[in-house]
Image: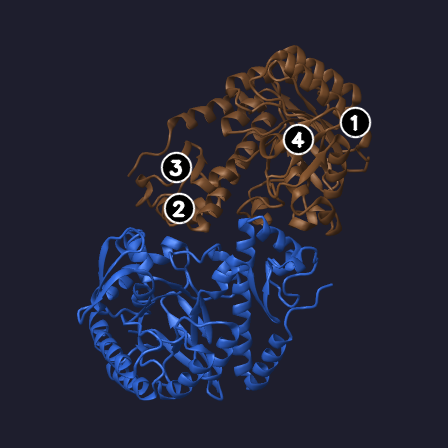
Chain colours: A brown, B blue
C-alpha cells in the first residue's frame, strides 16, 4: 500500500495536506464528485476537471452490476473506460447493498443480495470487494464493511462494528499491494464514543493508507455528526488522511474540516443540480421558483463557473420549466464548481492560519439567504 | 432586408456560397442544428460551435409559449438569452402549429390554436409571427405559411399554397427592415410542378432575401423529394440562398446539395442522438445493440469529435443501458459533428469541382454498413 500523504500545515484541528497516487496528487481537504456508474451525471470529465476536482468516486455496487468489473478491466480499467485520467476512489459496495438491493442476507462470510436492476443474486465479501476494486483499477480501495443503520442500539452497533473490523482484516489480507494504490479502513461505531475508539484501535493495529469515518450522514443530523467527529478524529492517526464518507452540504464540509477531516464525497451537488436546487454563497436557491422567471442576474453573482458567467436565472428557470437537459448540465456544473470553491477556500484559509475567521465569514454569508428579487 | 448572399462557385447545380448577417457569416451549403426551446438539446452552445455549426434554428411556436417572446426580448434577445453569439434563423411557427397544437382553426386572417403545453388559446398571423421573430431578434425570419399536408389533392395543395402566398405578402409588409436581418419566402405547392412554379413566381414578385422549399420531408419519401427539387430549384433565383426546411438524413443532404440547395435544418442528429442512434461514415449505428457491449473501438473510427476521440462503443453502450445523460450528450455531439463534417466535405468538393466523385464516394462508404464485430 503506497498512497502517500503529506501533512503540509495545520490550523487548530484542521489539516492542509496532499495525497499522492499512481494517477496524480490531490490537495486536501478535498471534495470528490460521485461518478456512480462510471460517469459524474450530466457532466463531461473535462468539465468535472475544470471545476477543480482532482479525484472522483466510483461505486463498486453499481459497476459490478453494470457493466461488470471484468468488462471494465478488459476495457482497460475505470480511468480509461470513463475517460478520467486522475485518481479514483471506489467505495466497497457495502453502503449501496444496504440502501439499494433487495433480499439481503448478512453472514460472517459476507452479504448475498438481489440486484436492484434485474433481480439476479450476487454475493459481496471482503475478498470479492477487493477483487472488484482491483479490476476497476481504483487508486483508493475501501474496506468492505457493514453500514450500521441509525438509530441503533449500542449492542447492535458494537456487533456490527466488530464484524466490520473482522472484514477490515480480511480486506487487508486480500488487497494486492501496488505502488500508488492504497487501501483505507473505515471507522464504525455509530454515535458511541467507546465503540469509535475501539474501531480506530482495531484498524490502526491492522494498518491502512487512510482512515474513513463511516456510518454518519445516515439521519443523525449535523449536531450528532459533529459531536461524533469531536470525539473520533482526535484519536485517528495524524499521519494518514481522514475521509468522511457521504458528506455533505457546504456547511457540513466546513464544520468537518474544522474537526480534522481531509476528504469528502457526496451526491448532493450532482443530485440537487438535477432537481433545480443550487448551492450558492448565500445558501440554496430553487431555480424552479417563479421569482426567477424574468431575473437577468446570474445564479450566484460571486461565481465564475460557465453557468453563472454565461446564463441568467431567467434562462436556467426556463430550462427547468421546459425539462431541458441543458438545465441539469448547467446546475450540476455550478454546484460542483461551488463545492470545489468551498474546498479551495478552506485549503487557503488553513494555509494562512485564518480558518476561524474564514469559517465565520462563510456562515455569515450563507445565513444572508438568496439575493433579493429585483 | 439585408442578409447578404455571395455565390462563390458552382459545380453542376450545386452552389458554394456565403451568407452575411448582423451576427456573422455562414458558409454554404450549411446545416443548422435545431435549438427548439432556446437550447440545442443536451449541448452547451460552445460545444455546438465546436462541431462547426455557424447558425442555429429557433422555434417561434415553442418560444412564444415558453418563455414568451416578450420575455426573451426583455432579456436581450435570443442570442443573449441562450448564449449563442452567432446567427439565428427562426421558423414562423406554422409547421409546429400543424404538428403539435390542438383545436386549430385556419382562416384568411391566420391560425388560432390551443397550446400543447397548457391548453391556452393563441393566435398566429403573418403579422404576429413577424413581431415575435423580431422580438426574438432572429437574423433570418421566415414568412408565416400554412404547412400543406401530404398526401394532398392538387386542388387543396393549390388553395393552401395560394393562402401562403397571400400570407407571404403580409409577412413582407409587416417585416421591419434592419441591416443584417433578412426575411425568407417559402415555396409551397407540394409535389406539383406547376404549383411550385406559380409559388416561386409569386414570391419573387414580392422579393425576399432568400427562398425556402417548404412542404417536403413530410412523408413523401426521398425519391419524390428529389424529383420535386429537380423541377423546383432551377426556377429559384440564382442570386439568393435556397433553404430546404426540415431535411434530413445525411444522404438527403448530399442529394439536395447536388440539386442546388444551400441550407438545411433537421432534428435528426439531436433527436436520434438521444435515442442511441448514431450517424456515421458507414451508415447508422444503434449503440444500444448488444454487439457493442465489449467493443473497445470508437463509434466512428474516421471521426475526430470528442465522443469518438475519448470513448469506446462499450462505454457509450453502457451509458445508454444505464440511462445516463452523458450518453445523450456524447451521441448528440457526434451526430452534430458528423452532419457538419458532411457539409464541410460538400463545400470543399464544390469548390474543387469534384462533387460528383465526392458524392459517389460518400454513397459507397454509407452502403458498406457498420464495421464488422470484433
Q: Kindly indicate whether the residues beneath marks 2 and 4 are on one polypeptide chain.
A: yes
Where is residue A176 shown, x and y percent of the image? 81, 35
Residue shown at 72%/18% (left/top)? A162
Q: Kindly indicate whether the residues beneath marks 3 and 1 are on one polypeptide chain.
A: yes
Of residues A326 and A113, the one drawn nearer to the viewer in this rendering:
A113
Label 1 lies in what chain?
A: A
Q: Check if mark 2's residue and mark 1's residue have beta carbons within 8 Å.
A: no
Q: CA distance from mark 4 to mark 3?
A: 33 Å
Q: Quadrant of the C terminus of chain B?
A: bottom right
Of residues B64 and B161, the one drawn nearer to the viewer in this rendering:
B161
* Residue A155 found in image quarter: top right
Label 4 lies in what chain?
A: A
Instruction: From the viewer's perspective, tell me whether residue B189 is left or right of residue A155.
Output: left
Of residues A161 and A124, the one drawn nearer to the viewer in this rendering:
A124
Q: CA distance from mark 2 to mark 1?
A: 48 Å
* Residue B135 found in image quarter: bottom left
Q: Earlier in the sequence, mark 2 or mark 1?
A: 1
Label 3 lies in what chain?
A: A
On the question of residue A55 being in view, the answer is no
Q: Which mark is residue A94?
A: 4
Q: CA distance from mark 4 to mark 1?
A: 14 Å
Instruction: From the viewer's perspective, tell me whether residue B218 is left or right of residue B166.
Output: right
Residue shown at 48%/54% (left/top)? B42
Residue marked by disc 1:
A170
Residue count near mark 4 (Cα–Cα under 10 Å), binned few <14, some 14–19, many ≥20: many
Residue count near mark 1 (Cα–Cα under 10 Å), binned few <14, some 14–19, many ≥20: some
Q: Which mark is residue A320?
A: 2
Where is residue A255 shown, x and y percent of the image? 54, 22
Residue marked by disc 3:
A286
Q: Earlier in the sequence, mark 2 or mark 4?
A: 4
Q: Check if mark 2's residue and mark 4's residue have beta carbons within 8 Å.
A: no
Amino acid at each position: 500500500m503506497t498512497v502517500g500523504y503529506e501533512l503540509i500545515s495545520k490550523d487548530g484541528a484542521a489539516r492542509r495536506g496532499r495525497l499522492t497516487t499512481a494517477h496524480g496528487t490531490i490537495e486536501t481537504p478535498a471534495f470528490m464528485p460521485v461518478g456512480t456508474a462510471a460517469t459524474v451525471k450530466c457532466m463531461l470529465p473535462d468539465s468535472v476537471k475544470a471545476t477543480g476536482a482532482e479525484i472522483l468516486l466510483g461505486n463498486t455496487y453499481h459497476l459490478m452490476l453494470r457493466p461488470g468489473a471484468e468488462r471494465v478491466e478488459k476495457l482497460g480499467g475505470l480511468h480509461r473506460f470513463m475517460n478520467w485520467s486522475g485518481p479514483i476512489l471506489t467505495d466497497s459496495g457495502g453502503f449501496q447493498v444496504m440502501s439499494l438491493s433487495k433480499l439481503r442476507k448478512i453472514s460472517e462470510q459476507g452479504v448475498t443480495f438481489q440486484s436492484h436492476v434485474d433481480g439476479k443474486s450476487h454475493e459481496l465479501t471482503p475478498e470479492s470487494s477487493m477483487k472488484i476494486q482491483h479490476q476497476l483499477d481504483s487508486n483508493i480501495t475501501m474496506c468492505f464493511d457493514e453500514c450500521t443503520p441509525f438509530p441503533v442500539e449500542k449492542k447492535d452497533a458494537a456487533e456490527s462494528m466488530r464484524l466490520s473490523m473482522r472484514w477490515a482484516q480480511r480486506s487487508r489480507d486480500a488487497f494486492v499491494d501496488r505502488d500508488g494504490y492504497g487501501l483505507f479502513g473505515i471507522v464504525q461505531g455509530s454515535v458511541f464514543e467507546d465503540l469509535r475508539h475501539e474501531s480506530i484501535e482495531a484498524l490502526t493495529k491492522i494498518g491502512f493508507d487512510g482512515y474513513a469515518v463511516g456510518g454518519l450522514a445516515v439521519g443523525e443530523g449535523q449536531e450528532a455528526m459533529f459531536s461524533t467527529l469531536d470525539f473520533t478524529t482526535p484519536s485517528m492517526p495524524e499521519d494518514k488522511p481522514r475521509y468522511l464518507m457521504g458528506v455533505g452540504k457546504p456547511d457540513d464540509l466546513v464544520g468537518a474540516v474544522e474537526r480534522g477531516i481531509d476528504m469528502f464525497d457526496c451526491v448532493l451537488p450532482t443530485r440537487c443540480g438535477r432537481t433545480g436546487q443550487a448551492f450558492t454563497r448565500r445558501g440554496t436557491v430553487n431555480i424552479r421558483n417563479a421569482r426567477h422567471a424574468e431575473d437577468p442576474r446570474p445564479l450566484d453573482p460571486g461565481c465564475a463557473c460557465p453557468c453563472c458567467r454565461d446564463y441568467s436565472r431567467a434562462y436556467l428557470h426556463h430550462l427547468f420549466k421546459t425539462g431541458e437537459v441543458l438545465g441539469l448540465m448547467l446546475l450540476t456544473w455550478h454546484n460542483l464548481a461551488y463545492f470545489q470553491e468551498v474546498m479551495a477556500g478552506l485549503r487557503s484559509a488553513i494555509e494562512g492560519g485564518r480558518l476561524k475567521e474564514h469559517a465565520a465569514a462563510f456562515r455569515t454569508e450563507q445565513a444572508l439567504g438568496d439575493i433579493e428579487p429585483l
